[in-house]
Image: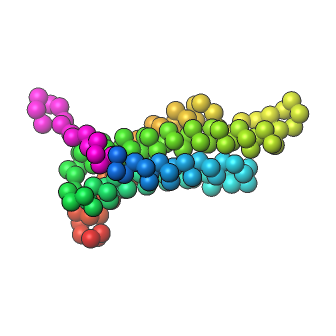
Amino acid sequence: MQGGQMQFKLDQAGLMKAGPVALIVAAVCGLAWISIGLWGIAGLLGYLAPIFAGVWYIMTARKSGSMPAQMDGLVNGAILGAVAGLVYGVVALIVSGIAVSSASFGLLTFSAYGVGSLITSVIVGAILGAVGAFGYSFLVQQGTIK
């Protein structure tokens, strides 16, 4: 810590390695909004996709040979979680519009996912990505995961 500021390393190479898998998982989770009967599960998947992104970042960093420091893992997991939340939100926004248009009743339509939900997905994705990265790295440090 220098002058009261935390220092962290932005791991672009690690994020680029972990990104494709995490973002494909987030997009597939967003596709659950296509069926109105799956909206409850789709909402839950919106929370699980960013957690997976954070965990996947730490797993990918470990496979490359180095375990990131705690703060580095938190920040990079939050970044990947926010991007996963954005991908989930964009796919859900598009797909739920398709499902809603097929279920509209004349002039009476309803919306399940909107721009506000997209912003919320990014913010919650950043928080949950950091939680996933922290949780997985904590379990590795404790020796629970080898």
Dominant SS in magenta = loop
Q: Is residue 116 magenta?
A: no
Expressed as whole percent of the image width and height from the top left, the position of residue 1 reads 12, 36
Figure colour scheme: rainbow
Looking at this view, name the residue that lies furthest to the left: 2
Q: Is residue 1 above or below residue 144?
A: above
Expressed as whole percent of the image width and height from the top left, the position of residue 120 reads 52, 36
Q: Residue sitting at 17 percent across and 31 percent down?
A: 5
Q: The C terminus lies in which quarter of the figure? A: bottom left
Q: Is residue 110 above or below residue 18?
A: above
Q: How many marks?
A: 0
Which region is colored magenta? 1-15
Q: Residue sitting at 32 percent across and 57 percent down?
A: 60
Looking at this view, name the residue that lies furthest to the right: 106
Q: Is residue 39 above or below residue 145?
A: above
Q: Is residue 8 magenta?
A: yes
Residue 18 visible = yes
Whether residue 23 sits left or right of residue 10 in the image: it is right
Expressed as whole percent of the image width and height from the top left, the position of residue 125 reads 45, 43
Q: Nearer the viewer, residue 9 or 109?
A: 9
Residue 43 visible = no
Q: Nearer the viewer, residue 95 or 42?
A: 95
Whether residue 54 sits left or right of residue 111 in the image: it is left
Whether residue 64 sits left or right of residue 56 in the image: it is left
Q: Residue sitting at 21 percent across and 40 percent down?
A: 9
Q: Residue sitting at 23 percent across and 66 percent down?
A: 142
Expressed as whole percent of the image width and height from the top left, the position of residue 54 reads 37, 51
